[in-house]
Image: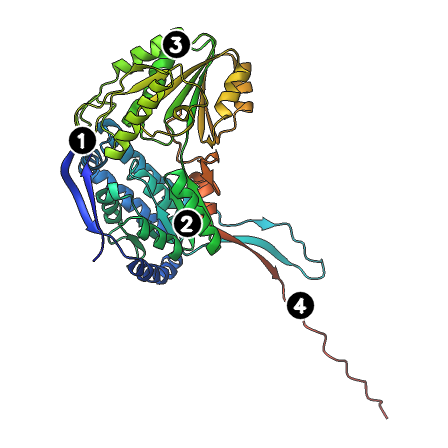
Amino acid sequence: MSELIRSCSPQSPADVVAESAAVSPQQVRDLAGRARLAQVEWHRQGAAGRASALRAAADRLRDRADPITDLVVREVGKPVTEARAEVGRAAAILDYYAQACFAATGDLLAPSLPASQPGLLYTERRPRGVAGLVTPWNFPLAIPLWKAAPALATGNAVLLKPSPEAIACGAEVERLFDGLLPAGLLHVVPGGAETGRAVVEAADVVSFTGSAAVGAEVSVAAARAGLPAQAEMGGQNAAVVLPDADLASTAALLANAAMGYAGQKCTATRRIVVVGDPARFTEALVAAVAALRFGAPAEPGVAVGPVINATARSRVLDAVEAARASGGRVLTGGHGGDGLFVAPVLVDRVDPAHPVAREETFGPLVTIFGVPDLASAVKLVNGVRYGLVTSVHGGDVGMLLDAVRGIDTGLIRVNAPTTGVDFHAPFGGEKASSHGPREQGTAALDFYTSTRTVTFAAPPPPAPAPSRPVEEVA
């Protein structure tokens, strides 16, 4: 009997949102076979046909925006304002890749053939086949669509395995494309680790977003199979506050970047590094965190709702106790309350080498550090195994540029929060945060296609007819 997958509302754990039998590995292989056959037809439809389907899916998502927003709030506990924004962004992603269907698929190169044999030398990009996509629960629409949309736009089929905590949202993604794609082209396959491994094994190209531990397993499995793969994983993201940063506005911005959606974003701010005496900024940050509304995610104005499950709640509370036991000072929060809620936690006086400061908690917990100068800040930022995103705040252009040059994360945001992703720009990190090529933007079009080089020589001229000897006239 198949494993039963059940998603429950984190703000009301007794509320079962959806349940489904896990798709077995054999079923995954069968669906991949169907998808591979449908992909041939999909590729032949050309750019106009693919663009039309993606635009129609975007329109359908906008038509269903309210109930889908409610579903996101209910299933993964995302505050309603953020959930509504995610629905809008997901529709915009579909629009973007609908237009990207018409992007150039190759380059005409300077002719390299000898002049005696004229012709063309060009490249063309072709779909890889079946894209195996493994996605998390925290952006249950945006992440599946920023993977599936470019895969579809470039002519691929899709096997999508959503997180077990977001199977209802995964099913909604599949419904967006009902009747718009060739039968069998896109399948959403709920399940656990076994189903995920089967998706990787059955695919021709793999994209994963999730934890560093699972991402490493996916990357190794893909490498053994000779598959192109990308894995977007964790981040222990820092914000650097320079001496001339405005205290109140920067504190408010970082409070939201750290604690919004209970810190459950790979781009959330986890560490705040203040250049100079941190006392005044820490005071402003405590006030900014206290001003965030904490509670049921469906209520307007709430910024911090529940964490996703009991394991996540224990992880945050255990980290708080570990920080306190090592001499850290807990400035806010640190208590659970009813259900799966954890009040936002600010901690200072923690050794930068402590695991709480180095490893991702993936919850509403931030550590604060003071350093004497920018060089020390850069060293502290770079001193963890992750390298996803860093934000730098201040007005001195020279210091800002020095920070940008010295920090080794894949994204750097100046006077902007670590959170927030521009879907039309490449996204990815360094070190343990990412493996493989970037995703999103035109980088995604490259990833889901392979390049071949074509030499197109003109046929050789016909050989001259043999000459006939002239007969002598008598």
For disc 4, the neighbor class at 10 Å (few under 14, some 14 to 19, many from 20) is few
Amino acid type, residue under disc 4 in the picture: Pro
Q: Would you identify the image quadrant in which residue 289 lies?
A: top left
Residue at mark 4? 460
The answer to which of marks 4 and 1 sits earlier in the sequence is 1
Viewer-side label of 3, 4: 3
Q: Residue at x 40, y 53 (%)?
A: 155
The circle on residue 11 is 1
Instruction: Give the farthest residue toward the front.
Output: 325
| Extreme residue in the left direction | 14
Which structural element holds mark 4? loop
Say which of marks 2 and 1 sits in front: 1
Instruction: Compare marks 2 and 1 and give the one earlier in the sequence.
Output: 1
Q: For the residue labelled by badge 3, is the local secondary structure a helix, a strand or a loop?
A: helix
Real-space CA distance between mark 4 and mark 1, rounded to the nearest whole angstrom:
74 Å
Q: Earlier in the sequence, mark 3 or mark 1?
A: 1
Labels 4 and 1 touching (C-beta < 8 A): no
Q: Position of residue 25 (x, y in %)?
A: 31, 58
Extreme-bottom residue of the structure: 474
Instruction: Verify CB contact (< 8 Å) between mark 2 and mark 1.
Output: no
Q: Which residue is under mark 3? A: 281
Q: What kind of element bears circle 1?
A: loop
Tell me which amino acid carries mark 3.
Answer: Phe
Taking the spot 53% from the left edge, 12% from the top edge, the residue there is 373
